[in-house]
Image: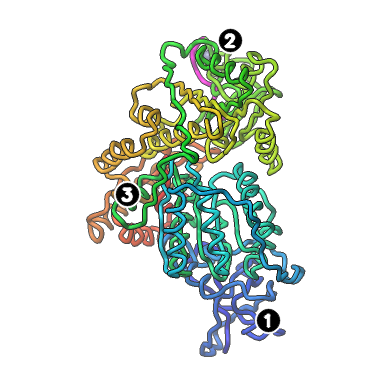
Amino acid sequence: MIVLDVAVPVPLNKTFHYLPPEYANPENVVGRRVKIPFGKRILTGYAAAYLDIEKNSSLKLKQIIEVIDEEVLINDETRKLADYMSKNYICSLGEAYASIIPVSMKSSKRISKKTKDAFEISDKRHVLNACQRNAVSVINADLDKNSCSVFLVHGVTASGKTEVYINAMEYALNQDKNAITLIPEISLTPQFLDVMTKRFGSNIGVWHSGITNVEKYKLFHKAKTGEIKIMLGARSAIFAPFKKLGVIIIDEEHEHTYKQEQKPSYDAREIAKWRGKYHNAVVVLGSATPSLETYKDALENKIGLIELRERVDKKELPEVKIISLKERLFKTSLLLPETVDAISKALARKEQIIVFLNRRGYSPAIMCKKCGSVYQCPKCSISMVFHRNPDLAKCHYCGETKYLPLTCSVCKSRELAVFGTGTQKVEDELKRLFKNAKIFRLDGDTASNKKSYANAYNGVKNEEYDILLGTQMIAKGFDFPRVSLACVIDADTSLYLPGFKSVERTFQLITQVAGRSGRGNVKGSVIVQTNNPYHYAIEHAKNHDFLSFYNVEIEHRRKLLYPPFCNIAKIVVRNKNEQKVDEDSENLLSYLKNLCNSYFIDLKLLGPVPAYIAKLNNTHRRHIIIKGEREKILHLARFVESFKQSFGSFIGIEIMPSELL
Ligand SMILES: [Zn+2]
Ligand SMILES: [Zn+2]
C-alpha cells in the first residue's frame, strides 16, 4: 500500500502517514504541500516522501484532502535542510518546513511563467581601492574554485563593504549562479535596493516582514524558477530556493536580528553556512563591529578574514567627543549645551545631523512625586511609557494602552510627573531649539510601513531634511554623504542590561552611529552623551578601536564562561499562575540535574531565575540556562522536548539565544 509520509507543523517529533487523494498518483503528491485532516483541524502538511507499507487492516489511515501545489516545492536540499534544522534547533520536521516554505495557501498555478531575459548589468561601477580590490579577488577566487568558504569582511565604517558585496554578486551572476543578501533592519531596504538596482536592474527580489504572504509566495516561486537572480531581505530570505547559489552575503553580521527567538530558533548565519556547503557557495559575513564569536573564528582561521582598514578615498574616521551626563541628569533637557552648539553649527553649514536615542515615546516613566511609585503596565512587570499626541501611556512589550492616570495607584496623590527622555521629547526639544530645521523622526511609532522607510531614506538623501532622529533603525548602515554630525543622546540605554552581550551591543551601537558621520566630502564628528565616560566600551568606541575592545571583552567571556567559550540553551517556563511557574521550573531543574548527573556531567545548569521582564502579558516567565557543548545540550534538550508536555506550564527551548534576558 502506497502512503505519503507527511511532516506536520506541530510540536511532535514524528511524521504521519496519509493516503493519496483518489485523483492523484503518489508521484504527483510527493514534494508538495497538502491539506490534511489532523485531529479536529485541517492543516497544511508537507508530503516529503512516499512509502510502500504493509497493508494492515486494523490501521485506518486518513486521506489527503487536497494537493496544494502543482510543482514540487520540497527538493533534496529542502529535505536535508529541514532535517538539519529539526536536529539543531529542536523542532519537528513540519515546523522546519513551515519556516523554509512560505505559508500562503495560494496555489502556484496562477503565477506567471518564467521570463528568459538575460540580466543586464549597468556600467555604473565604482573604482575600487586597493583594499576593496584585494577583498573582491579573494572572494572571486573561491567562486572560481567552486568550493565552499566563509569570510569575515571586517571593515571600518564607510570602508566600502557594499561595493565589495556588489562585485562578489556580479561575479557570481556572471557564472550563472544566484546570490542572497541579508540585511539586519527593514529600514535599510530602500538604500540597498537603490544601490543594487543600479547594477542589477530588475533581477532582485525583496523579502521582509513588511510584504504579504502572497507576495512571499510569488518571490519564492520566482527564485525557484530563476526569474530573479538575487534575493535581498531580512533573516528568512536565507531560505530563498535558488537552484545554484554562488554567494550569500550577511551584512552587519553581528546583529541579533539574524537569530530567530521563536521555534525553530534558527540562526541565519548558521543556515547560510549550511547552504554554502550544500551549494559550494561563498558566504560573506560583513561588519565594522563583528560579533565576538565570528571574530574569534576568524582569528583561529576557522573562517577567512578580510580587513578593510581605511575609509574609501582615505576619508578620516570622525572625531568622537564624549560628554558626561553626570550631575546633569535632573536638568530638564537631555540635550547638553555642547550638543546643542554642535548641532546649530552643523545646521549653519547646511550639513545634516543624525540624532540617536534608543528609546521611543516621550518619557519612559510616569512617577508619583509623593511616594515615588512608578506606573506599571497592568499586564507586565515594566513601566508604562508616556506618549504625546495623543497623550497616552503605552506598554512597549504587550501593547497595552491606557489614558494617563489622574492619581497614584498607591497613595492616591494627584501629583504625577513624567521622567526621562524618549525620541518624541527629543523631537520637541529640537523643534523648539531649531525652529527652521526640518526633522524626520524614524522609530517604532512613525515607521508603520515600507513607505516610511523609503520616505526617511529618500528625504534625507535628497536633503529635504536637516536632522534624522530615531532609534536603532537609524543606527546602522545608512550612507548619507551630507551627514557631518552624529549625536548619541544616551549611550547607556543598553550598557547595564543584565545580559552577557550588553557591553558588546553598546560598543557596536556607538561605533555604528559614529559611522554615519563624515562619509562624504565633509569632515565628520560625533558626540556621545553618557554617564560612564570611562567605560571601556565607550572609550574604545571613541577611538574606533575594535581590536582593543575585543581583547578586553573576550577575556570577560572566557572568565565567566559565555559564548564563544561555550554553547548555551535557554529554557523558558511560562505560566499565568506565579506559584505554578515557580513549582514547575524548580521541578524541571531537578529533573535536569538528575539527567546531568547520570549522563551529561559536563553540562552546567543555572537558574531558575525570573526573566528580565518577569511578567509579560499576564504570563510569568522563568529561565533555566544550560551551558556546555552543543551536541550534549541538544541531547538534553531532546529529553526535555519529549517530557515537557507533562508539565502544566509552557516550556520552550531556545538553542544559542542571542541574549539571556
Ligand atoms: Zn504615590
Ligand atoms: Zn504590558
> Quarter for ligand 2?
top right
Q: Amino acid at mark 2?
A: Glu
Instruction: Give the class, few, some or many, for how many residues have Cα within 10 Å of label 3's Cα (few <14, many ≥20).
Output: some
Who comes first in sequence, dot 1 or dot 2? 1
Helix, strand or loop at mark 3: helix
Disc 2 and disc 3: Cα gap in Å? 53 Å
Q: Position of residue 234 (x, y in %)?
A: 57, 51
Side of 547 where 224 appears, left or right: right
Helix, strand or loop at mark 1: loop
Position of 202 relative to 515 (above/below): below
Residue at the spot x=37%, y=50% of the render? 294
Is the CB–ligand 1 distance for label 2 below 8 Å? yes
- Using the image as rendered, state which of residue 193 and residue 442 is in the foreground: 193
Q: Is residue 156 visible?
A: yes
Query: Mostly what secondary structure, the magenta segment?
Result: loop
Q: Find the magenta span and give its range.
A: 370-377
Who comes first in sequence, dot 1 or dot 3? 1
Q: Residue 296 has which mark?
A: 3
Q: Position of residue 325 (x, y in %)?
A: 44, 16
Disc 1 and disc 3: Cα gap in Å? 53 Å
Position of 348 relative to 615 (above/below): above
Position of 137 relative to 389 (above/below): below
Side of 106 where 641 appears, left or right: left
Residue at the spot x=60%, y=58% of the render? 231
Q: Amino acid at mark 3?
A: Lys
Q: Which residue is mark 2?
A: 415
Answer whether residue 374 is magenta in the image: yes
Residue at the spot x=42%, y=57% of the render? 644
Position of 635 relative to 56 (above/below): above
Side of 465 where 519 appears, left or right: left
- Using the image as rendered, state which of residue 557 and residue 323 is in the foreground: 323
Q: Which residue is mark 1?
A: 21
